[in-house]
Amino acid sequence: MSEIINILIVGVGGQGTILASKVLAGVVQEKGHEVKIAEIHGMSQRGGSVFTQVRYGANIASPTIPQGEADIILAFEKLEALRWLSYLKKNGRILINDQRIDPMPVIMGTVEYPADALQIIQDKCQNVTMIDGVSEALKAGNIKSVNMVLLGVLSKFLDFDGDIWLKVMQETIPAKFIDVNLKAFEAGRKY
């Protein structure tokens, strides 16, 4: 593989973005590709913005994705999708969990959550996929498995077999949570 693939995973603290990026990186490594990751946790314990940059291919010099170079943005929340939209390359794809989590300034009443966030994204990007991750996670058995639903959707746009994803998930996720997470991942693959 000579091409570098850039995937930006964005969300809010507590949504499982870091675990999703670890599974993705494990899948890439399992296939023998070079992979670099940059994680920024921010105020993750307080619901702040969290993002992970995953780059794979050959001869990757830096783990950070240049602005305008993300092939795919996987957004766990709508406002985070809007916040990071400038990183998406022309004709890139953005996968958005249809969930609203108010940041602290909105909770405190100092700013308003942009009601037109989704419209702004759709006006600037032609490859938008909306996902009802919460409903799918609840069907799988646990709302906290939204991250695996979203990872399942992402997996459909990448060239890695489903079996590799399942192997890496079993190696990465604690045994007591594996069943619900596998169900959530499969729900995302079928979404």
Image (tube, helix red, strand yellow):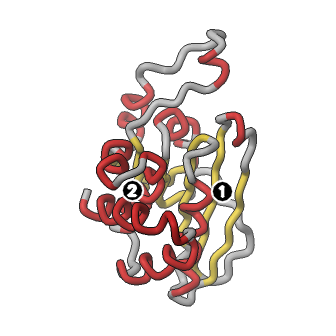
Say which residue label 2 marks.
149
User: Which quadrant of the figure contains the C terminus?
Assistant: bottom left
Q: Residue 88: percent from the left, percent from the top?
A: 51, 51
Decide if residue 81 is in sight here.
Answer: yes
Q: Secondary structure at mark 2?
A: helix
Q: Which residue is found at the position 61% from the left and 17% from the top?
A: 107
The disc, 2 or 1, on the residue closer to the chain's N-terminal end is: 1
| Amino acid type, callout 2 | Val
In this view, 189 is above or below 49: below
Q: Which residue is found at the position 55% from the left and 25% from the top?
A: 102
| Amino acid type, callout 1 | Pro
In this view, 29 is above or below 99: below
Q: Nearer the viewer, residue 22 or 58?
A: 22
Say which residue label 1 marks.
66
Q: Nearer the viewer, residue 117 or 139?
A: 139
Q: Quadrant of residue 47?
A: top right
Describe residue 21's horizontal placement relative to residue 39 as left or right.
left
